[in-house]
Image (cartoon, grey):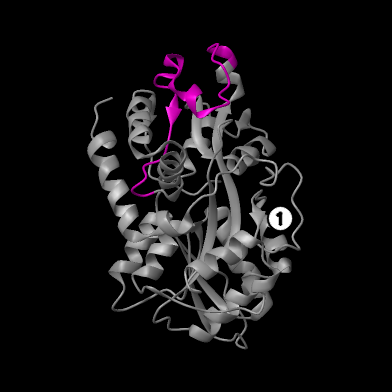
Amino acid sequence: MRAALGCTAILLLPALPASAQGSLNLYCSATIEWCTPIARGFERESGIRVVLSQKSTGEMLAQLRAEARNPRGDVWWGGTGDPHVAAGEEGLTVAHESPRIAELHDWAQAQWRQTEGRTVGVYASVLGFGFNTELVARRNLPAPRCWADLLNPAYRGEIQMANPNSSGTAYIVIATLVQMMGEEPAFDYLKRLHGSINAYPRSGTAPITAVARGETALSISFVHNAAEEAAAGFPVGHAVPCEGTGYEIGSMSIIRGARNMANAQRFYHWALSAEAQIAASAEARKLQTMANRNVPLTDGAPNMATARIIDYDNARFGAGAERRRLLARWDREVGALPR
């Protein structure tokens, strides 16, 4: 069963024997179906009890800010990298170096270097479209292949995109379009697209879930989410935009003032290992590209190497000031528009 979207899920995982080596408070911004295997896998490997809290990246960043004077979390794992970068800039997370850094893909190492060690990539995935193949056929809609296609009047009221104020996925949509088109044309595009949007849910995975359930025809989503829905038997197709697209780096950070710092560092090293990434992604049936080079691409997973990916500027668009500026502009010029 899916966890309620956009809400907090707190899991107190089964108690461990008396020999357990303390505890770890794990903040997770991936789906609960992935957060749980990560937590359980570390418990099995370490004997450390994990207390798990799951929220979207935007909501978790807000929580870290609220808890800055009295941190309750130890490690923040998963979710789009931009909020992790912002947290590092604000002094909410601390730099750390793992001996496994050299095992990671270039994009994961680059994020670690750009943030001076405050966050590191743990997985990546490509931004694109998901669509319900049955609804598209029934309503005689063309399957989208390009960003320009989404402005087709036939799609009016047929598209979902998450709210960028709470969803890292949706913020990456804005940042991608700004980098591809330029800021003025990108916001003109978003305003025109607004007329076709039927909802801006809080969670980045909510739109593709709605596609899979037949509640909307199209979504702007990470294509691995669409591939996962198709693998689960839902009538879902996906496409990577023909003009090019951005991507997310799912990230990991150690929280400043962590009460269980030694355990946080142990988790950090473990989570970067090929063994941990293979086991957790297999159990959760996730199709992202994992950060460790020794993790093979899962059958059915979108291949980043063959997608037309832009040179996404993580340093600029992950910066807190730029993020706040773009979100404020979206609120004024797009989010406030009537539908």
Please give the name of the residue rendered at 38% of the width and 67% of the height, measured from the top-left corner.
Answer: 87
In the rendered structure, the answer to whether residue 331 lies left or right of residue 210 reads left
Residue 49: name its quadrant: bottom right
* Viewer-side residue, 149 vs 58: 149
Instruction: Give above or below for 1 relative to 68.
Output: above
* Spot occupied by residue 57 in the image (x, y as percentages of width and height): 42, 56
Find numbered disc 1 in the image and state the secondary structure of the residue it sits on: helix
Q: What secondary structure predominates along the stretch shown in magenta?
A: loop
* Spot occupied by residue 140 in the image (x, y as percentages of width and height): 55, 11
Instruction: Give above or below for 204 relative to 160.
Output: below
Q: Is residue 27 visible?
A: yes
Amino acid at pointer 1: Ala
Q: Is residue 145 magenta?
A: yes
Please give the name of the residue rendered at 52% of the width and 30% of the height, measured from the top-left corner.
Answer: 211
Q: Which residues are magenta?
A: 137-166
Check disc 1 and report the residue beneath it. Answer: 282
